[in-house]
Image (cartoon, rainbow, N blue to C red):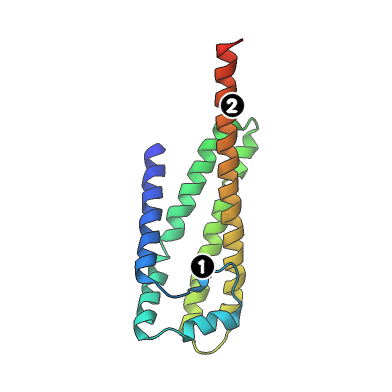
Amino acid sequence: MKKALILLAIGSIAISVAFGQLGGFPIPDSSFYANAQEIQAMHNALDTQQLQAYKSIRLLDLVYPLFYGLFFILAIYALAKRVCIRQWTYRALPFFPAIAMMADYKENILLMLALRVMPEINWAASLAGFCTSAKWVSLLASLLICFALLIRQIHLFVRAKCIRCGP
């Protein structure tokens, strides 16, 4: 599992770097919430070269949720299994990154649909903002869960060391 986590982390970082190289302009994915008018304004502000780069980002963003989602799912599962007493806990906590993945895929599909009918404002652009918010909330929850589980793991490790050393 450690190798898988490392490969998924490297893949997520590599895709993030590729986004930075292709971008340089605001995209709806990076904001916490964008309404339909803001999404259409971002799309309409792109010149031909930026539009082509944005379409490349859209394609690259089809694999990105898989990388970061699986990374968080495996990390949370591994940490929770070590530090949680109840079985339901380590089985339930990985659902947060799964929700983020699903919201990100829905966001991507809706943004592609909105891009096809630009410059008109449509229902896809309206729904994309809600999916973006759901993605960021569940990603933040996943990150907080990872940190909490990591702190719990460190606490248990230090406690075990102190008990073994004794007074």
Q: Quadrant of the N terminus?
A: top left
Residue drawn 42% across and 54% down?
67
Q: Quadrant of the C terminus?
A: top right
Query: Considering only vertical position in the picture, is 65 above or below 123?
Result: above
Residue drawn 57% across and 86% down?
121
Tell whether label 2 touches label 1 (CB within 8 Å).
Answer: no
Q: Where is residue 81, by image quadrant?
A: top right
The location of residue 143, given as percent across then percent down, is: 56, 49
In this orientation, does residue 123 appear? no
The location of residue 94, given as percent across then percent down, is: 56, 46
Question: Could you say whether the residue bearing mark 2 is in a helix, strand or loop?
Answer: helix
Q: Earlier in the sequence, mark 1 or mark 2?
A: 1
Question: Gap in Å between the C-alphas at discs 1 and 2?
Answer: 36 Å
Q: Residue furthest toward the bottom? A: 120
Q: Left or right? Give the position of 72 relative to 84.
A: left
The location of residue 13, given as percent across then percent down, is: 39, 54
Residue that numbered label 1 is attached to: 30
Query: Considering only vertical position in the picture, is 119 above or below 153?
Result: below
Residue drawn 60% across and 56% down?
138
Question: Could you say whether the residue bearing mark 1 is in a helix, strand or loop?
Answer: helix
Which mark is on residue 156?
2
**Residue density around tag 2, few if under 14, some if 14–19, many if 20 or more, within 10 Å:** some
How many marks can you see?
A: 2
Residue drawn 39% across and 86% down?
47
Q: Where is residue 64, by image quadrant?
A: bottom left
- Amino acid on which the number 1 mark rests in the picture: Ser
